[in-house]
Image (spheres, helix red, strand yellow):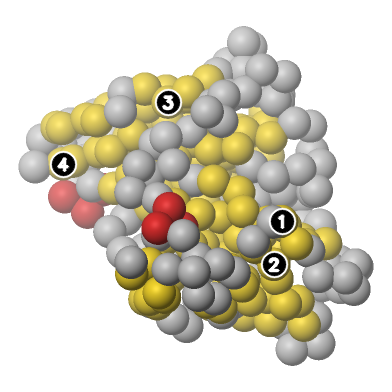
Amino acid sequence: DSGVTQTPKHLITATGQRVTLRCSPRSGDLSVYWYQQSLDQGLQFLIQYYNGEERAKGNILERFSAQQFPDLHSELNLSSLELGDSALYFCASSPLLSYNSPLHFGNGTRLTVT
Amino acid sequence: AQTVTQSQPEMSVQEAETVTLSCTYDTSESDYYLFWYKQPPSRQMILVIRQEAYKQQNATENRFSVNFQKAAKSFSLKISDSQLGDAAMYFCAYRATQGGSEKLVFGKGTKLTVNP
């Protein structure tokens, strides 16, 4: 158990809809990362938050947004969903801003858009 | 931008044998970190091993070891005495130490099958 909790585990929704994915980092971790893993692909970095502030942005679509709350949990909002958004979405956390500390991943949320 | 390439989409190994998974990366930086993650069918991302670029000594974790060739920008993973539980997707990842983010850049992965 990595200590990172993601909910829900599975999500099935229709095109055009909006969903929210939730992540609770490991206790004490201030940095949260979101990744998207499409079929047969590696993990694509979406966005990073540190202590409530956006720190880095990757290949995140304008239809997607995220935030980190004062209690350090994070939410990833996906809107106007398309079939191509079907993927496994991972949240990861790490303490502080240490380059040596590994990212600890949650078990992911499997999103299926029909 | 940094990129990570895993040229072997799939590999197989006999139980108890040794297998090496390849990874190359592209960067202009001199200081960085490299990681191997394992993703079993459960989908969980599990850290296998990590290497600091400034260390010449190759990292080792039990049956897992790396061959880090900095000049060649190569970072291969060797699994010795392969076990059925080693069957998984393996991802190589790079982390820069500059640029304002501690994110990992991942390769596309290698699917490892272990045959009994």
Q: Position of residue B17 (x, y in %)?
A: 50, 75
Q: Disc 1: which chain?
A: B
Is A13 located above or below residue A101 in the figure?
above
Q: Which residue is mark 2?
A: B65
Mark 3 surroundings: few (<14), some (14-19) or many (≥20) residues within 10 A: many
Q: Which residue is mark 1?
A: B61
Q: Position of residue B31 (x, y in %)?
A: 86, 66
The reply, left or right, for residue B7 in relation to residue A10 is: right
Label 2 vs label 4: CA separation?
40 Å
The tag on residue A43 is none
Q: Position of residue B50 (x, y in %)?
A: 72, 57
Q: Are marks 2 and 4 on the same chain?
A: no
Q: Are marks 3 and 1 on the same chain?
A: no
Compare residues B95 and B61 and report the one nearer the observer: B61
Instruction: Classify the position of the C terminus of chain A by image quarter.
Output: top left
Q: Secondary structure at mark 4?
A: strand
The reply, left or right, for residue B81 in relation to residue A111 is: right
Question: Would you say residue B26 is visible in this rendering?
Answer: no
The reply, left or right, for residue B30 in relation to residue A8 is: right
Say what amino acid the circle numbered 1 marks.
Answer: Glu
Q: Are marks 1 and 2 in contact (CB under 8 Å)?
A: yes
Is B74 located above or below residue A17 in the figure?
below
Q: Which residue is mark 3?
A: A6
